[in-house]
Amino acid sequence: MDMTRYFACHQQWIAGQEAGLGELTAAAANAAARRATEAELRAVVERCLRGYEEYATTRRAMAPEDGAAFFAPPWCTTFEKAVLWLGGCRPSLSIRLLYCVSSEGLEAQLQEFLSGHGRAGGDDMIRPTGSGLLGINAMQLEQINNLHGRTIHEEGILSERLASLQEKIADRPLLPIVREREQERARAAALPRGSASSNGLVGRFAAMGLAGVDAEVDAAMESYTAGLAKLLEEADQLRLSTTRELATEILTPRQAVEMLAAAKQLHLSICDWSRRKEGAQSALLPPAATASSSSSGRPNA
Amino acid sequence: MAEICSEVVAPAVAEGKQGAECDAGGRAARRRRMEIRRLRLAAERGADEEASRKRRKLECRREEEEDVETGPARYGVTSVCGRRRDMEDAVSIRPEFLPGHHFFGVFDGHGCSHVATSCGEMMHEIVADEALSTGLLDGDGEERWKGVMERSFARMDAKAVGSRGSSDPAPTCRCELQLPKCDHVGSTAVVAVVGPRHLVVSNCGDSRAVLCRGGAAIPLSSDHKPDRPDELERIQAAGGRVIFWDGARVFGVLAMSRAIGDSYLKPFVISDPEVRVVERKDGEDEFLILASDGLWDVVSNEVACNVVRSCVRGNAKRRDDRGRSSPTSNLSPRQSSGSGSGSSSGDEAPNDDCGGAGSESDEESCEVDKACGEAAILLTKLALARQTSDNVSVVVVNLRRRPRP
């Protein structure tokens, strides 16, 4: 397990996110000022999605070595770890975010609309024609709602599988090994002091304690880690497919740019703020305690 | 689910329309038309089925007594899961579920979605059956409609309580494998029957129907909350208790005093609807809004009516701006009905183009239909913007009738 590689990978990903946010924000501003063509916006959306996909590919390649690391990543802050779902954001988060972002400014426009001053802005609201997220139309809302339902269903399936895997900790292959070792230890303790076999056993345990593992235990742990890696891959897949469907099949390119920009902004802000807060907290702790938490402290998607 | 129905022309309506065209001659003409109809009925085969016989009888009597038509069902509907993780709302729209009558229902489930889903699938059939076996006419008084609706709700309640295991579980139903009989599941029901002369609104629970008439927002149902004085009295008289636990709740559990289902809270929580029969007033009645509390929790009756009226006005303004010659080519997003999310709607025929080049009045009426759809989605978006935490279902029914040609 080479943690530095994970940290480097994550740092690179965050740097990419920051650059991507710049691009998306600029594109959104251009779209609002009608300075960008549909094709240009579509290209920005595609680059953003590619970024997510490449990161997922890298994670997929790394996860089999240590799937568990992605479920409680040392490179994330405590807050970030606490809100992770299967190594990343909940796929349904995109829809919740969309509902929030798409209603920004609605109240203000509504007042104008109700008072009868139907200028272009107010008109936008009920007659959505290639406008921003505020102009989500009936067909889009139907599609978003369908996607929402499917995503929550898929999340449920993956959550159930994680639950099974977590429960399996108390089952084969790990538990029989635990029991067997416990019996061996009890037998060893029952033997009279100074006997040769006792020394041998104690010696063996001591050696194992130093190494921390043996082949049998390794194999048992590996089976869980492999399960986690598989789940991570599928969860990433769901995150990607939800975002892709939303950004390329349901929303207009302009809306997609706005939504993706908001998602990146949220992600990077949480990253920043939680790191700052936890950095301040750990400054109050004795030096030994801070050593382990002074990571690059960035989340993954 | 989001859907705008510009126009639904069921066969019976089409016939009615033809009839209306030659109505100039008054009684004599109508009698002649009746004779033609009777002949046609006589010529039809398979008239031995009781229900269809009743239906025809009703149709004939209606024509004898009624001068007005209901017109096609025109409405907009949106139903979304919103901020919740479970979709427990169901919407049912059944144009011409009885000759000359349209059925609109919003059902907001709790505990699980299956009672609301059953209501969406069955309620209109039960109401139609009760109305037919009563020989009910639109012109009939409040009492008879009241009886029909009360019996229908009681039957629906019995079905909902016993529906586990019998009917197919809803695809979204969560409790499928958990309990053989889910006592802790129920649904609100607000049902509007739009007839030629009357609106019949029946309510059980905290969904709501609001009529916009002459610019005013008139609630046609009163939410069944456990702390409504008369409901509180009823619950206590039955030996129940209302406990304030995150709002007033029957035994601290259910935040409404009436519901379909919830057998474990009977007799305190009852399924009896409150029924209101309102005579339609042409020229004053604008539209009817049915919605679940996902809307009403955050949007007042008045604001909701203002939003719909502004949509109508906005459409009219655009039409005037555009000039009357150009056909309406705006997007009219129609969705396949009943897709996903536990919602269901009737077998309406899609008709996006508002019948093509119509008369001015047709176009105007068509714009109002569009406005209903836009209003439904705008109200939904407003509810989401105002942080509603529940599912949101909105039905906006256009009550303006086309002037007779």
Image: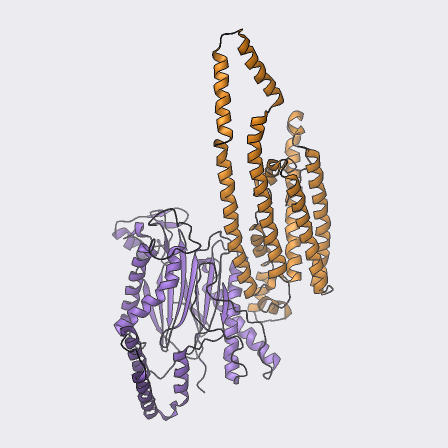
- Label total for image: 0
Q: Where residue B64 appears, x then y in whole percent?
A: 30, 84
Q: Where residue B91 appears, x then y in whole percent?
A: 43, 63
Q: Nearer the viewer, residue A81 or B338?
A: B338
Q: Residue at x 60, y 57 (%)?
A: A246
Q: Where residue A184 appears, x then y in whole percent?
A: 50, 18
Vertical order, A272 against B338 (above or below): above
Residue B308 shows in this picture: no
Vertical order, B4 against A301 (above or below): below
Residue with the most extreme top position: A194
Vertical order, B51 against B180 (above or below): below
Residue B193 shows in this picture: yes
Q: Is residue B73 left or right of residue A196?
A: left
Q: How is the image coloured?
A: by chain
Q: Nearer the viewer, residue A121 or B122?
A: B122
Q: Quadrant of residue A197?
A: top right
Q: Quadrant of residue B70?
A: bottom left
Quick one: quadrant of the N terminus of chain A?
Answer: top right
Q: Is residue B258 left or right of residue B296?
A: left
Q: Where residue B173 appears, x then y in whole percent?
A: 42, 53
The purple one among the chains is B
Query: What color does chain A have in the rendering?
Result: orange
